[in-house]
């Protein structure tokens, strides 16, 4: 099994102090930062844009920017996010776009590729693309807002992606996002997840270093 990676979600930090939040993540020895990008269309909320990533880079952040595009037309923004400093660009399977061409565009900018699916989307939707991506993001809440309750009806999907990964000997990560804390993270880990987005549970943890250490030992 791959070692667990914790990816704190900047969405849950103080948006007047995004640079400090990213620096605080790095100071704990955490190497990933999850950036939730929303368009008010694919999801009923708005968040950051490419300029946020670019500003974090200008202020010295060297974190791995795990960029989650919750956009109806993600292909239109790949170049902007790549130039702004994204390391991975994850798009959703639900929009009716040319996914394969979008993966190629992401790779042409030197970024890794992720593919996400919503709780209501059958896991079979990602199956044709598994060999083309570096990460599958199984949403464990309906995306759009932080602080929602984890949905345990998503657990069988994690197990299904994990079994495809084994059968086909694929080298991809399985990420979970939404309502993840130590308890729900451990449940997802037991089904094969190895990459854990944590917004509220991380930024509100009384002792973030202890929280991160427990995740590293999941
Ligand atoms: C949900 C986002 C998540 C969100 C998770 O739309 O994709 O990344 O920040 O937040 P928590 O961990 O608070 O559920
Ligand atoms: Zn996310």
Image (tube, grey):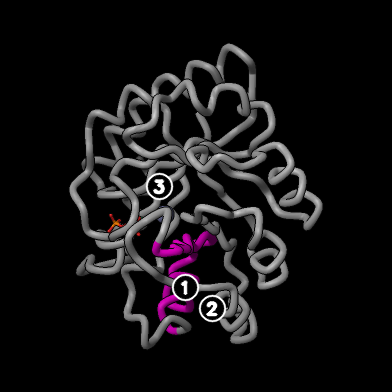
Q: Name the residue under label 3.
A: 196
Q: Is residue 136 above or below residue 47?
A: above
The residue carrying pointer 1 sits among few (fewer than 14), some (14 to 19) or many (20 or more) residues within 10 Å by Cα, namely some
Q: In this view, does 205 lie to the left or right of 80?
A: left
Q: Is residue 178 left or right of residue 112?
A: left
Q: Name the residue under label 1.
A: 48
Image location of residue 145, percent across then percent down: 29, 60
Mark 2–mark 3 distance (CA, rounded to whole Å): 22 Å
Q: Earlier in the sequence, mark 2 or mark 3?
A: 2
Mark 1–mark 2 distance (CA, rounded to whole Å): 6 Å
Which quarter of the rendering shows the C terminus? top left
Quadrant observed for ligand 2 in the rendered image? bottom left
**Residue in view at x 52 percent, y 36 percent:** 136
Decide: marks 3, 1 in contact (CB < 8 A)?
no
**Residue in view at x 52 percent, y 59 percent:** 32
Q: Nearer the viewer, mark 2 or mark 3?
A: 2
Q: Nearer the viewer, mark 3 or mark 1?
A: 1
- Is residue 98 inside the magenta stretch? no
- Towards the viewer: 180 or 79: 79
Per the rendered image, the range of residues in magenta is 20-40
Decide: marks 1, 2 in contact (CB < 8 A)?
yes
Q: Name the residue under label 2.
A: 52
Image quadrant in which you'd find residue 205:
bottom left
**Residue in view at x 48 percent, y 39 percent:** 94
**Residue in view at x 64 percent, y 30 percent:** 171
- Is residue 33 inside the magenta stretch? yes
Image location of residue 18, percent across then percent down: 43, 81
């Amino acid at each position: 099994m791959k070692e667990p990676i914790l990816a704190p979600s900047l969405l849950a930090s103080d948006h007047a102090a995004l640079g400090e939040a990213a620096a605080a993540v790095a100071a704990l020895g955490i190497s990933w930062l999850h950036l939730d990008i929303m368009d008010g269309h694919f999801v009923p909320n708005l968040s950051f844009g490419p300029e946020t990533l670019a500003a974090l880079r200008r202020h010295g952040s060297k974190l791995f920017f795990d960029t989650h595009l919750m956009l109806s037309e993600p292909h239109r923004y790949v170049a902007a996010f790549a130039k702004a400093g994204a390391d991975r660009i994850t798009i959703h399977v639900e929009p009716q776009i040319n996914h394969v061409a979008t993966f190629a565009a992401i790779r042409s900018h030197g970024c890794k590729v992720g593919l996400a699916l919503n709780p209501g989307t059958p896991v079979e939707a990602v199956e044709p693309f598994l060999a083309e991506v570096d990460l599958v993001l199984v949403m464990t809440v309906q995306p759009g807002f932080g602080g929602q309750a984890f949905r345990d009806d998503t657990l069988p999907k994690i197990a299904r992606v994990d079994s495809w990964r084994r059968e086909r000997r694929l080298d991809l990560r399985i990420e979970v996002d939404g309502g993840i804390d130590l308890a729900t993270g451990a449940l997802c880990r037991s089904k094969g997840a190895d990459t854990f987005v944590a917004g509220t549970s991380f930024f509100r943890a009384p002792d973030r270093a202890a929280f991160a250490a427990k995740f590293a030992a999941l």
